[in-house]
Structure formats: structure tokens, C-alpha cells
Amino acid sequence: MADTVRLGLIGLGNMGFLHCRLLQNIPEIELTAGCDVDERRLQRITSRYGCEGFTDAQTMLKAQICDAVLVATPHYSHTTIGIQALQRGYHLMVEKPISVHKADAARLIRADKRDDRVFAAMFNQRTNPAYLKIREMIGNGELGAVRRVNWTITDWFRSQAYYDSGGWRATWRGEGGGVLLNQCPHQLDLLQWLFGMPERVQAFCRFGAHHEIEVEDEVTAFLEYGSGATGVFTTTTGETPGTNRLEIAAENGLLTYDSSESFIRWQRNAKSVSAAIAENKGFEKPDTQEVRIDCAGEGGQHAGVLANFAAAILRGERLIAPAAEGIRSVELANAMLLSAWRGKAVAVPISERGYARALKLRADSSVTKATVTDQLADDMSSSF
């Protein structure tokens, strides 16, 4: 049995280059191939890390010099390249989001037909000690039933130069969305991982509110859950300094986590909210005790997910982030955009075909970055 995984990395932009650096400290993964349509980026990686270089994904996949593939290309080609890798029998990891829209995510997941293949997604925030602890407290009943969730994630600031740095960025045709599809897949994944999927979503999105872009850069969404719980999710790339603050009102108290702090704050009720409503007098609130739960550090993050991917291939270790779960964050993003376009709440699950048609209408009518979108479409149709 092999003691290392030979990895091919497709897409050598910002995230691809980060993965290359991280892989040098993961002994169970050997970078054997890199692929990018930009020959300068490709040369930088092959010369620095001594791997084989390819400018075409299909050629790399046919070369059979890898056991596994990591796809870190622009979003639409996650689906096409991912399907090709799975069909050729490779283990696969896909960067977030796993696809641009629910229909493509479902196509990608359906292509995973071999039980002996490992298929993972890069949801590195699942390794954060704070979110692991919060998930534990929800799962074991310590918090009691969740009644309300507020997540304000506004520290995703991006300048106009960032959006201008690539022709695919911030376009319906090249990226498929803005803050919801690029920055917030992490929090959308955590949202469903912690609280499950809502039944209804109503979102208010502003498109190009703070930048010269066509996609959303500010979002506020209201979520309704089957349990009766509600949620508000707010995000933007046009605010600074911004914050990343999660607030959970539950039966047994109020839990808050701010990413700038090294602890979770829990105001624990001596009596549940339901019991207090039924039994207390007038304005009488239950007593509370403030508890601070240490959650210092960020966990393994990208490196932890990569190491886990290798361990799953070599020893059958359970995946931190199975790719099949990635369709949920994609659907949440799609539902928010669909609600904003329609100007009303939408039911979840949404129609795969309906959303794909709505997105295509916006991509086809796109006028920004027109000089690059046709080339992007050609690149994607030929699988990078």
C-alpha cells in the first residue's frame, strides 16, 4: 500500500499557489503535476516545486501521473473538470464553491459513482475550534433548541483593484455571483452545517453597490426554518473594518462568537426560555450565568483539510468536508440571489433548472468585461 498520495493541482492562481506552499509541509501528499492556461504561472510552480506542468486539464488527467486531483480554477469549471477527474477514477478535492449553481453541483455529485474514491470539498472553516465547539453544543442539546440566528460577516473587504485583477471576477458569466459565491461559501457551509437548511429564504441584494461590478457585493437575508427558528445573514465586500459575529439565541441562553476574540461567550439561563415564559411573573427573567469557553486558534484550516484528504485516501479516515455536502451552501447562495431577483421569498429546496435559467439570462445580458467573457466561455467549455 502506498504511503503518499500523488496530487495534481489544476488552477495555479491565488488559491492554487497557496495550496502549493501548504503541500510542502504535508508529508503524505506529493505534488506531481500542476496545470494552468497561464504559462507564466505554470512555470513559476514547476520550477519552484519540481512537478510536471500542463496547460490543458484533459492532457494532465490522461497522463496518469497522479492519484488525486485538486481543482482550484474559476468556478464554472469546477463542474466540468471535476466530472472528468471522477470519470477517470481520480480521488478529487474541489475548491469552494463546488459549483456555481445547484444543477451543476448535482451533476458533479452524481458523477461520483465509485465507493473506493474519495471526493472532498475545501471547507476549511470546519476545522475552526469555535465552530466545532458550537456544533457540539447544538448537537448534544447543551444549548437547547435554537430559536434565532444572526450572522454578520462583513470583514470580507475587497478593493476595486481586486475585482479588476481577473476577467472572470465579479461577472455572472465568469464567476456566477459575487460575495455569496466567492467569499461567503465558507459561512454558508457553516450555516447549514450548524443549523440545517431553512425552508424559506428572502434576501435583499445590492448589485455593484460599492464597486464597479455587475454581481452582488451586499446581501441581507432572512431565513425561516421548519423548527420555527429564524435567521438573519448579512454580508458585504464594501465595508471596513467589518466584523464576523455569530449570535445564537437558544432555549438555554444566548451564545455569541466574534472571530476577533479567542473565546465563545455564553449567557446561560438557569431556566429555559419556554419554561420562563410559562412560569415566570410579569417582567421576571430567568437568572443567567456568563460562561467563557476557550476557542483559541484557527485549527488546521486549508492544511488540515488537505491532510485529512490524504488520510481518507490512505487509511479511510472520515472526511472533514465531503463534497456531497457542498450542494447545500451552493443552494443557499442561489436561493438568496433568486429571492432578490424575484423580489419575494423563495421556498427551499429551489428548482435546479429554474435557477440555472435565471442565471443564464443574466450571464447572456452581461455587458461588463465583455472583452474577456467570450474567451472565458471558450476556456470553460474545453475544460480549462
Image: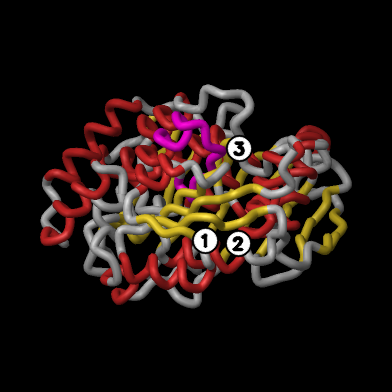
Is residue 349 inside the magenta stretch? Answer: no
Percent coordinates x, y for residue 153 in the rendering: 52, 61
- Residue type pointed to by label 3: Pro
Q: Is residue 157 left or right of residue 178?
A: right
Colour setup of the view: secondary structure
- Residue type pointed to by label 1: Ile
Q: Nearer the viewer, residue 256 or 351?
A: 351
Q: Which residue is mark 3?
A: 322
Q: Is residue 38 visible in the rendered structure shown here? A: yes
**Which contiguous range is marked in magenta?**
83-97
> Where 373 sits versus 226, above or below?
below
> Where 384 sits versus 361, above or below?
below
Which mark, by number, is residue 233?
none
Percent coordinates x, y for residue 302 in the rendering: 61, 58
Answer yes or no: do the residues labelled 2 and 1 have beta carbons within 8 Å? yes
Q: Nearer the viewer, residue 291 or 130?
A: 130
Q: Could you give the CA–CA distance between mark 3 and mark 1, rounded to whole angstroms?
A: 24 Å
